[in-house]
Amino acid sequence: MADDIPAVRRSHYVCQRRSVALDRTLISNSVAQYRITQ
Protein backbone atom coordinates (compact mmCIF):
# COMPACT_ATOMS: atom_id res chain seq x y z
CA MET A 1 0.00 0.00 0.00
CA ALA A 2 2.86 2.37 0.77
CA ASP A 3 4.12 1.92 -2.80
CA ASP A 4 0.94 3.54 -4.13
CA ILE A 5 1.38 6.79 -2.18
CA PRO A 6 3.89 8.45 -4.56
CA ALA A 7 1.68 7.68 -7.55
CA VAL A 8 -1.36 9.09 -5.75
CA ARG A 9 0.54 12.23 -4.82
CA ARG A 10 1.80 12.58 -8.37
CA SER A 11 -1.69 12.28 -9.86
CA HIS A 12 -3.03 14.73 -7.27
CA TYR A 13 -0.24 17.17 -8.18
CA VAL A 14 -1.07 16.83 -11.89
CA CYS A 15 -4.76 17.47 -11.14
CA GLN A 16 -3.83 20.59 -9.18
CA ARG A 17 -1.65 21.85 -12.01
CA ARG A 18 -4.47 21.26 -14.49
CA SER A 19 -6.99 23.11 -12.34
CA VAL A 20 -4.57 26.03 -11.95
CA ALA A 21 -4.03 26.18 -15.71
CA LEU A 22 -7.78 26.00 -16.24
CA ASP A 23 -8.34 28.83 -13.75
CA ARG A 24 -5.78 30.98 -15.55
CA THR A 25 -7.44 30.28 -18.89
CA LEU A 26 -10.86 31.19 -17.53
CA ILE A 27 -9.49 34.36 -15.92
CA SER A 28 -7.73 35.48 -19.09
CA ASN A 29 -10.87 34.75 -21.12
CA SER A 30 -13.06 36.73 -18.75
CA VAL A 31 -10.56 39.61 -18.75
CA ALA A 32 -10.57 39.61 -22.55
CA GLN A 33 -14.38 39.66 -22.60
CA TYR A 34 -14.39 42.44 -20.00
CA ARG A 35 -12.02 44.55 -22.08
CA ILE A 36 -14.16 43.97 -25.20
CA THR A 37 -17.33 45.09 -23.44
CA GLN A 38 -15.71 48.21 -22.00
Image (cartoon, rainbow, N blue to C red):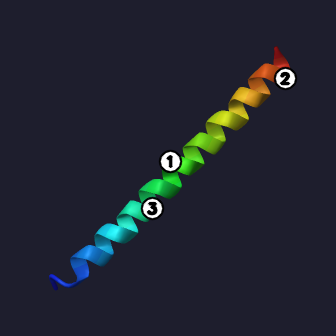
Tell whether 3 sits left or right of 34.
left
> Do residues under tags 1 and 3 come within 8 Å of each other at their CB atoms?
no
* CA separation in Å, label 3 and label 2: 31 Å
Q: Position of residue 30 (x, y in %)?
A: 70, 32
Look at the numbered disc 2 and give the secondary structure of its residue: helix
Query: Which numbered disc, 1 or 2, marks the residue that appears first in the sequence?
Result: 1
Using the image, determine if residue 4 lies above or below residue 22: below
Location of residue 31 (image quadrant): top right
Label number found at residue 15 = 3
Residue marked by disc 2? 36
Residue at the (65%, 44%) spot, across then down = 25
Look at the numbered disc 1 and give the secondary structure of its residue: helix
Q: Amino acid at mark 2?
A: Ile
Query: Which numbered disc, 1 or 3, marks the residue that appears first in the sequence?
Result: 3
Location of residue 38 (image quadrant): top right
Q: Position of residue 1 (x, y in %)?
A: 16, 85
Using the image, determine if residue 9 lies above or below residue 32: below
Location of residue 28 (image quadrant): top right
Q: Could you tell me how many numbered marks the image carries? A: 3
Residue at the (62%, 35%) spot, across then down = 27
* CA separation in Å, label 1 and label 3: 9 Å
Label number found at residue 20 = 1
Q: Position of residue 24 (x, y in %)?
A: 59, 41
Residue at the (44%, 64%) spot, across then down = 14
Q: Estimate how packed mark 2 is, as few (under 14), some (14 to 19) or many (20 or more) residues with alpha carbons within 10 Å.
A: few
Q: Position of residue 37 (x, y in %)?
A: 83, 19
Q: Estimate how packed mark 1 is, as few (under 14), some (14 to 19) or many (20 or more) residues with alpha carbons within 10 Å.
A: few
* CA separation in Å, label 1 and label 2: 24 Å
Q: Amino acid at mark 3?
A: Cys
User: Of residues 33 and 6, which is closer to you in this image?
Assistant: 6
